[in-house]
Amino acid sequence: PIPNPQSPIPNNFFICVKIIIIKIINNFTKIILKKNMSKKETKYKILILGDSKVGKSCFLTRYADKTYQEDYLSTIGMDYKIKNYELENGAIIKLYIWDTAGQDRFRSITSNYYKGADGIILIYDITKQETFNNVRNWITSIKEEAPAKVVLILVGNKVDDEKNRAVPQSEGEKIADEYNLPFLECSAKSDINVTETFDVLIKKIVEINPKNKQGQKLQQNRIVFGEKKKFC
């Protein structure tokens, strides 16, 4: 018999259409999830240490925000910023960068944040000899409190103020050689070697502690530095 066009569509037809739609949505969702998983972010914790007023906060804001504030107040306790570090191949590192207080009364707070640190930037002020003299004390504290595989880099800040230099570059190189540390002289104010400091640090971190496949890819996609690198 010829079907009547006025007859109602059977319920099982709608059920079949609904099932097909659900399958399409599920497959699409799986594709999206798979794509997002392939771009899973790698997280690393970085500490910036050093005496008070060596320029730690300015160093952090210069790198994370591309800004510089001359009259930055001393950090009370801890502060941090999050910075994405993306490569051309799509691998992403999410950096949690902690700015720590340099005052003695906050040392106990700072030591609590050593746990889980992947990298440490130890900064002294090239115009203040005392901040350089305390580098050994900081390194001792790091050895006692930080994870065994933490990557440490030594930085002499404020090279923009060369006329008031109190610590020769050779002295920074000497102590870096003694502890087998990468060493750079930088300026947060003039944006000299700030980004390069993080490039060196991250390269070393990934070599020592690749947390996932994204981390392993970094070794092939970032600028290759030697075991030790010094910058003027």
Image (tube, grey):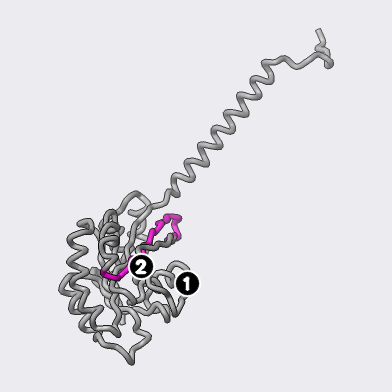
Disc 2: CA contacts within 10 A as few (<14), some (14-19) or many (>=20): some
Quarter of the figure that contains the C terminus: bottom left
* Picture quadrant where residue 169 is located: bottom left
Going by the image, does 6 lie left or right of 13? right
Q: Is residue 181 visible?
A: yes
Going by the image, does 58 lie left or right of 115? right
Residue at label 2? 198
Q: Amino acid at mark 1?
A: Lys
Mark 2 or 1, closer to the camera: 1
Nearest the camera: 62 or 7? 62
Q: Position of residue 98 (x, y in %)?
A: 36, 62
The region drawn magenta spans 84-104
Question: Against 194, is 171 above or below?
Answer: below
Residue 83 disc label = none
Is 40 within the magenta? no
Quarter of the figure that contains the N terminus: top right
Q: Secondary structure at mark 1?
A: loop
Residue at 32% over, 51% down:
211
Question: Against 67, is 2 above or below?
Answer: above
Q: Position of residue 207 (x, y in %)?
A: 28, 59
Residue 66 disc label = 1
Q: Is residue 86 visible?
A: no
Q: Amino acid at mark 2?
A: Phe
Is 103 within the magenta? yes
The reply to whether discs 2 and 1 touch (Cβ–Cβ < 8 Å) is no
Q: Earlier in the sequence, mark 2 or mark 1?
A: 1
Residue at 43% over, 72% down:
62
Question: Against 223, is 193 above or below?
Answer: below
Residue at 29% over, 60% down:
109
Q: Position of residue 197 (x, y in %)?
A: 34, 71
